[in-house]
Amino acid sequence: IILRLPDDSEVSDELWDEVIELMKFWVVDKVPLIRTLAVRALSRFVNDSENSDILDLFLEVLPLE
């Protein structure tokens, strides 16, 4: 759903924050498909300067894959 939303979608900041936090949690899930989908969803937010920690998280978990 996140990947299919247009960039100009009207979504509250609180909802985006909740989604981002859940995706960060699922990036380290034991099921590979869940991890993959979480990374894809988070990739939408990597370029956002407010979410620079997402790139750090990617770099942290990449060697584990």
Image (spheres, rainbow, N blue to C red):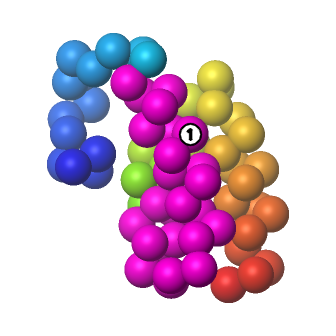
Up-down relation of residue 5 to residue 34 (above or below)? above
- Residue 44 lies, in percent from the top left, at 43, 45
Residue 41 visible from this viewpoint: yes
* Magenta span: chief secondary structure: helix
Location of residue 6 (image quadrant)? top left
Residue 58 quadrant: bottom right
The image shows residue 41 at horizontal and vertical percentages of 41, 53
Q: Which one is nearer the viewer's eye here, 63 or 47?
A: 63
Residue sitting nearer the eye, 16 or 44: 16
Q: Which residue is mark 1?
A: 21
Q: Name the residue at 28% across, 50% down.
A: 3
Instruction: Indicate yes or no whether the magenta region holds residue 29.
Output: yes
Q: Is residue 45 visible?
A: no
Task: Specify start and end residues of the magenta stretch as a single range.
Answer: 15-39
- The quarter of the picture where the C terminus appears is bottom right
Q: Is residue 52 left or right of residue 2?
A: right
* Residue type at numbered disc 1: Glu
Asked where in the image residue 53 lies, by quadrant, the reply is: top right
Task: Decide whether residue 51 is among the magenta residues.
Answer: no
